[in-house]
Image (cartoon, coloured by chain):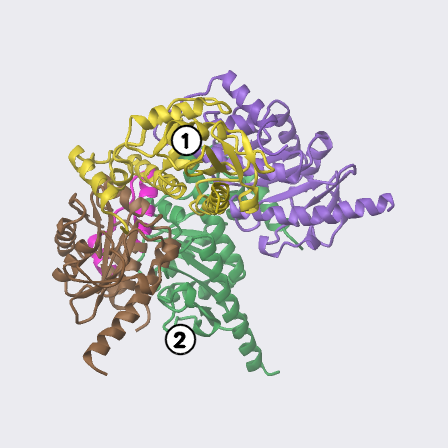
Chain colours: A green, B brown, C yellow, D purple
Amino acid sequence: MTVVDDVRHAILALRQEVCDLHEQLTRYQLVVWTAGNVSARVPGRDLLVIKPSGVSYDDLAPDNMVVCDLHGRVVEGEHAPSSDTEAQAHVYREMPEVGGVVHTHSTYATAWAARGEPVPCVLTMGADEFGGEIPVGPFAVIGDDSIGRGIVETLRGSRSPAVLMRNHGVFTVGATARAAVKAAVMCEDVARTVHVSRQLGVPVPIEQHHVDALFDRYQNVYGQR
Amino acid sequence: MTVVDDVRHAILALRQEVCDLHEQLTRYQLVVWTAGNVSARVPGRDLLVIKPSGVSYDDLAPDNMVVCDLHGRVVEGEHAPSSDTEAQAHVYREMPEVGGVVHTHSTYATAWAARGEPVPCVLTMGADEFGGEIPVGPFAVIGDDSIGRGIVETLRGSRSPAVLMRNHGVFTVGATARAAVKAAVMCEDVARTVHVSRQLGVPVPIEQHHVDALFDRYQNVYGQR
Amino acid sequence: MTVVDDVRHAILALRQEVCDLHEQLTRYQLVVWTAGNVSARVPGRDLLVIKPSGVSYDDLAPDNMVVCDLHGRVVEGEHAPSSDTEAQAHVYREMPEVGGVVHTHSTYATAWAARGEPVPCVLTMGADEFGGEIPVGPFAVIGDDSIGRGIVETLRGSRSPAVLMRNHGVFTVGATARAAVKAAVMCEDVARTVHVSRQLGVPVPIEQHHVDALFDRYQNVYGQR
Amino acid sequence: MTVVDDVRHAILALRQEVCDLHEQLTRYQLVVWTAGNVSARVPGRDLLVIKPSGVSYDDLAPDNMVVCDLHGRVVEGEHAPSSDTEAQAHVYREMPEVGGVVHTHSTYATAWAARGEPVPCVLTMGADEFGGEIPVGPFAVIGDDSIGRGIVETLRGSRSPAVLMRNHGVFTVGATARAAVKAAVMCEDVARTVHVSRQLGVPVPIEQHHVDALFDRYQNVYGQR
């Protein structure tokens, strides 16, 4: 099998995986209509696979996923890619450890983002997954790399795989597209629970050394090895 | 094929489309029981296709959709049309660019409507879809054209395809019935997220020139061309 | 066909109908686990058909519905009837126009009930279905006819088919079991929307003559004739 | 059939039951991703059956459930058990009447837990199922038996089968795994309804003698005998 065949196989597999992962966004009601997407890096290549722009989740198929280079230019596919492609390409360029990116406007996380307020770490689930508060990134216009730059700057100063872009919505990253989807699911769950808790009073903070211990255990012990 | 055949084909296709679009209203939980409906204009004709009154979403079929003229009188169909028909007919008469109208009592949008308060534009999604705040129309009784007049007067002064009728619910318009359904989905999503954000403080406003740029890009660049 | 056959056929049909209507309670998330039920009067007989006590909605079948007399004593069926049977039997005894009763603990309606506060009429949907506010009934213990008496006393002074029993939940009535289910669905929808509206301010009242006109139209014009 | 065969049959049946009960956690939206689990005691043996750690609910099968002793050590199964195993094993060791344990981070219950505030008994459903308020347990780190000790200490001073572990989530117990799942469903329902009620005012308390009577009736009369 040639190197070209290898890449071809990787892209075919990622078209399927990226397509399928959108089912988790609808299942957990993180998105409405066409407003959210998943992408994945093609391992070892300066390429990404992403949702087409404005296509209904019901109509997604491996075939209509779009392959782009890391400047957001279409390399393969008959559809225009997500309007978030340039932002996500920037993340892949600047953060080589990232293998997947997800964007949603999930309700509770976006509500914190609209106030420009990070979600405080008052739940063990928040410490586990985000290692502290879920941070807020800057307001940025859509369509060039300002969103990408805002994401990278914010995540570099944080243990969190999720950033709340001000007045906009959520971007999450992960070693794989699946991990980024998980972070998007957990982000909304934590944002919602802390919101509800704050409605009737002040949640008890978790001491920093407990946050650190929880984060460390979850990253290193939880799940199957 | 004669002109009459043409109209017959258009009506058959719209019966199917209008019927099917109601699935999006239930999927996004914008309606309960029978309280909401979709209509479409028959292109080039003074006719509309609309849901029958008080019929369960489970029992909708292309056959029981009702064809009316633009004064709300039944032209074809064995059922009484939606009690909103006169209001929607008025919209089609007065706004020739409108090809579809949707009515819901979706929870969060209707909650703003009950206070007579527009939904402020504090989310990029609000700027994209509504080009500013989602406006409030007057209180109007059901059954004559006062609702229709209230919708038209309010939408004419706004870029928004959605209007919150005071103490009542949401009406949305679009170039097609599908576009009007999309506006109804986005209206509830924006109304809900801004509501949740406001529960714990004050969302950061988006500057007007950013609202304008977002609206322009979304109307002209987003999606497939 | 003898009179006995007639009753037998009516009971068989009602076993199916009452069983099936529970699907609407789960679909609209008005109930969890086994906490809610539907009953129907056997027309012209001092009998009712009701859900068995503590049986999961997944396991309901026409066969396990229970037939009781209007004092709540089992006439036909191998299961114990709902623990609300005595309350509902009282309603059928005292209100001959009632053909169906529904009980839920739906979240928002029960939240108003826990404060002992009626849901004000600030939505056209509230005027349509309830003809004014949704009233609160007294606190009553479960298992004898105090709940039934509280329901009847409250509904007799109101146009509403729904009553919020204090600290407990919702009871609705209708000419048929289906109409009572509809009232339960609308009750939660109105209770939720008014709750959400009140969270950020004061909803605008609807003038009494408008409430009267809306109620009259909805009872007499809406739906198929 | 030998004693060994008996145990083998009991374990096979519990693998199926524990696996299936997770469907109730997702159905009632008590869990997201992999964050919650069910376990059952093997009757008459110092063994329990529990969900594997970090495995998606879609991928659960009787085969991948894990059998552990009551110190949380794997006895049978190819997967690592839930990271809550040690906590739940402690509960089975200390509370011989407990046959099932459930853990969730359900939103409203966890919101009360984040404030360290018990859910007051202002609903008949709360009196029925919990016999009073739903109590709060201490903050405890994950991975040793501190959570287990916190659960046992809190439940011993209460009639409630549910405990809100501070900043963490919910643990429930029952005579069977199914009863513990029911308690988890009811806990979230009561926590949500009381939360919503409190948002707009103060729920009316239920007098203690009524709470006692409701609890007694529900434990002894409700359901099928």
Q: Which residues are magenta?
A: B186-214
Q: Which residue is mark 2?
A: A74
**In front of the other: A174 or D6:** D6
Pointer 2 indicates a residue of which chain? A
**Left or right placement of residue B45 versus residue C8 in this view:** left
Q: Main secondary structure of the magenta part?
A: helix
Residue D135: tell me if it is visible: no
Question: What amino acid is at disc 1?
Answer: Tyr
> Which dot marks residue C18?
none
As helix, strand or loop, the secondary structure at mark 1 comes to helix
Question: What amino acid is at disc 2?
Answer: Val
**Residue A159 on the magenta segment:** no
Q: Are marks 1 and 2 on the same chain?
A: no
Q: Say few, some or many: other residues with alpha carbon within 10 Å of mark 1 (under 14 / 14 to 19 / 20 or more).
A: many
Q: Residue at x 64, y 41 (%)?
A: D84
Instruction: Return the x and y of residue D47 as percentages of the image width and height.
Output: 76, 41
> Which dot marks residue C92?
1
Q: Is residue A91 above or below residue C29?
A: below
**Residue B203 on the magenta segment:** yes
Pointer 1 indicates a residue of which chain? C
Q: Say few, some or many: other residues with alpha carbon within 10 Å of mark 2 (under 14 / 14 to 19 / 20 or more).
A: some
As helix, strand or loop, the secondary structure at mark 2 comes to strand
Instruction: Return the x and y of residue C109 as percentages of the image width and height.
Output: 38, 34
* CB within 8 Å, label 1 to label 2: no
Q: Residue at x 58, y 56 (%)?
A: D58
**Left or right placement of residue C4 versus residue B59 in this view:** right
Q: Marks 1 and 2, how far apart in space?
A: 69 Å
Residue B98: tell me if it is visible: yes
Q: Is residue C162 above or below residue A133?
A: above
Q: Is residue D130 above or below residue C214?
A: above
Instruction: Return the x and y of residue A120 as percentages of the image width and height.
Output: 44, 40
Image quadrant in which you'd find residue B214: bottom left
